[in-house]
Image (cartoon, rainbow, N blue to C red):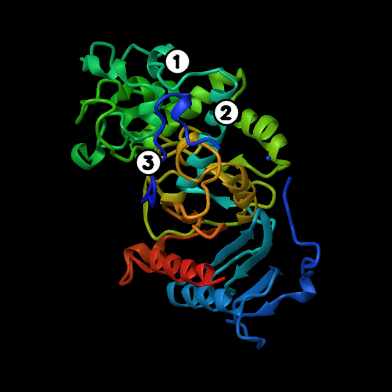
Amino acid sequence: MGRSAIRNLAILAGLGACIVACSQWQDPRLPPLTSSSARSADGRAGENAIAIRGIGNDPRLDKLVTAFMSQCGVPNAELAVAKAGTITFSHAYTNPARAISTTQRSTTMRLASLSKAWTSAALYNLIVARKIEPRWKVFQYLGITKPLPARARVDPRVYDITINDMILHESGWDDRVSHFDPTFEMRQIALALGLDHPIDQTQEVRYQLHEPLQEKPGTTYAYCNFCYTVLGMVVAKASGRSYRAYLTKILGSELRLSNVAVSPTVGARLPNEVAKYYNPYAGLSALYIDSRRKYPYPYSGDGMLDEVAQGAGGLETNADSMLVLMKHYIIWGVGTPPPLGQDWAREGEMPGTNTWAEQLPNGVHYAFLVNTNSYAYGTNPNAFTNLQYEIEATLQAH
């Protein structure tokens, strides 16, 4: 689901080799700003000045974010920073020249691949509770072994893929070679199966079973969105709940969070969700299979349904909640936070969304969310990544 930053890979080879090492914190000295406390990015009132709301004060960070938003046409953004597990800076940014809704600290946005960090946290808990073992063969565990179409030939090595292989992105499916990621081909899969309705998770898995492997499972890293859709299904089976119920009732309860949810692909936004996701393209819908109308990419025109890709990229929350998760779990892989001196980062990108979360070597954590990726198609496609290097340098100097 877009690019992912890897500073260190968490290698999981059974629970004993896990990178193992749990309420939302806020500096009581920094009261939240009220609506009347909003200020412009440059301290002046102007219709195009980017409004900032939140707690903490760091003009250097605000300057970086507002310059990026102005130059790249970003409507809404959130940046939150924590030191030693305490949120010390949390700003919500609104670009009135672009946005149709005002960003608050409580505003939630789609996470894209940061969703995988929540899936990983759930997996860690279930491994520790001995509900699952990383060495288990994933499709046998799920009871999904018959391909679609029914007579399709399956490489027998597919049935050797373990939960651990999927955690490590070593399934053997490599879309850099195959150029096929079922996460963004849900309409194509539905049509190939002769359906006039959208696919569900089981149909996606059964279809993928017959897709050729490019490598032997467990041997080669190849970033895999589909793997985390499957791992979300593992969370559901192992917990005896739906994936979203596990996040809200178990993991959310543990972290004292109530704002982690699956973002609806189409229709009304959830309470506190940003009003719109911005992307310039449109395509045939993964939801309305019998329609030839084109839908915006963030709303099924890209071939993806959030409700199907839940564990891979279907979640939404806010930047503060990302920091709460990062206080207890690593952002990449399965385990608890890294010791000082190690750097762990993950990027999420899909149409209408770009996100970043990082656990820096000095113990500072940060999360940055925006509701567009339109700049990725323009003259400066690396603007988002470059911004992260600038934010990192600022926070490393703290």
**Alpha-carbon span between mark 2 and mark 1:** 14 Å
| Total number of numbered discs in the rendering | 3
- Residue indicated by mark 3: 303
Residue 299 seen: no
Q: Specify whether 185 is left or right of 277.
A: left
Circle 2 or circle 3, nearest the eye: 2
Q: Nearer the viewer, mark 3 or mark 1?
A: 1
Rendered residue at 44%/43% (across/down): 300
The kind of residue on which mark 3 rests is: Gly
| Residues at discs 3 and 1 in contact (Cβ within 8 Å) | no
For marks 2 and 3, give the CA distance: 22 Å
Looking at the rendered structure, the secondary structure element under dot 2 is helix
Marking on residue 61 = none
The circle on residue 243 is 2
State which quarter of the image contains the N terminus: top left
Disc 2 to disc 3: CB gap under 8 Å: no
Q: Position of residue 316 (x, y in %)?
A: 58, 46
Instruction: Please tell me which residue lies in front, 270 or 394.
Output: 394
Q: Position of residue 117 (x, y in %)?
A: 51, 41
Residue matched to label 1: 142
